Each structure stands twice: as C-alpha cells, then as structure tokens.
Amino acid sequence: MTLNELHIKLKELGISEDRYYIHGLYGSPNDDNKLALTVKKGKYTTEYEVYYKERGEKHSERVFTAENEACQYIYKQLKENKEIEDKYSK
C-alpha cells in the first residue's frame, strides 16, 4: 500500500481527515493530537515513522523501512480506533 492508497482506504472507511496526518500530503495539516506517518531519510534507506503526537511530544513511535508496512500499520490502528469509537458512541 502506498501513502495515496492509504488515504483512499481511510476515506472509504469514513475516517475524518482531522484524525490523522500523512506526511503533510493527506489528512490534517498538522500532526498535533493525532496518529501521524512521516517519511524521512535514514542513514541507509528511507524510513517511515508512525507515532502519536500529544502536547508536542511523540509517543508510541514505530519506524519502518517499507512504505507498505508503515501504511498497513497506521491503517490497522485507525480502523481499530474507529471500530471502538463506533461501538461505544451508540
């Protein structure tokens, strides 16, 4: 899965764009108080960092070297969060 495909799948699930940040390309314009995926240059390869940012500090950081793995991970997290919210908001 690519970043673009991730964005499309999240829209299909009905997840609001203010719930996630995907490298400034998709979702919210900032990464405060939401699940985020950023792309950065690592020492030997491109790195995909997934984290939750709260009050300016990153929490639950995971770094992936494959775009597909990072996208699958953030997709799973956001999908599970939505399922929980849907279950308890009724």
Image (spheres, rainbow, N blue to C red):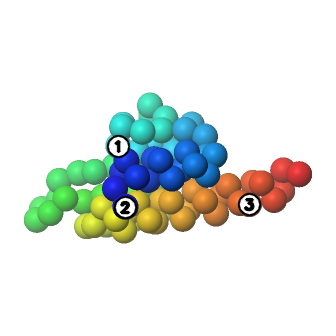
Q: Is residue 43 left or right of residue 56?
A: left
Report, in whole angstroms, how far the alpha carbon at label 2 lies from the one at label 1.
15 Å
Name the spot of residue 18 as percent of width and height, x first.
57, 37
Q: Residues within 10 Å of mark 3 (few under 14, many from 20)?
A: few
Answer yes or no: do the residues labelled 2 and 1 have beta carbons within 8 Å? no
Residue at the left extreme, as displayed:
44
Query: For mark 1, what is the residue?
Result: 23
Q: Nearer the viewer, mark 2 or mark 1?
A: 2
Q: Which SS class for mark 1?
A: loop
Q: Amino acid at mark 3?
A: Ile
Q: Which mark is residue 60?
A: none
- The disc, 2 or 1, on the residue closer to the chain's N-terminal end is 2
Query: For mark 2, what is the residue?
Result: 1
Image point 47% across, 47% down: which residue?
8
Image point 45% across, 47% down: which residue?
7
- The disc, 3 or 2, on the residue closer to the chain's N-terminal end is 2
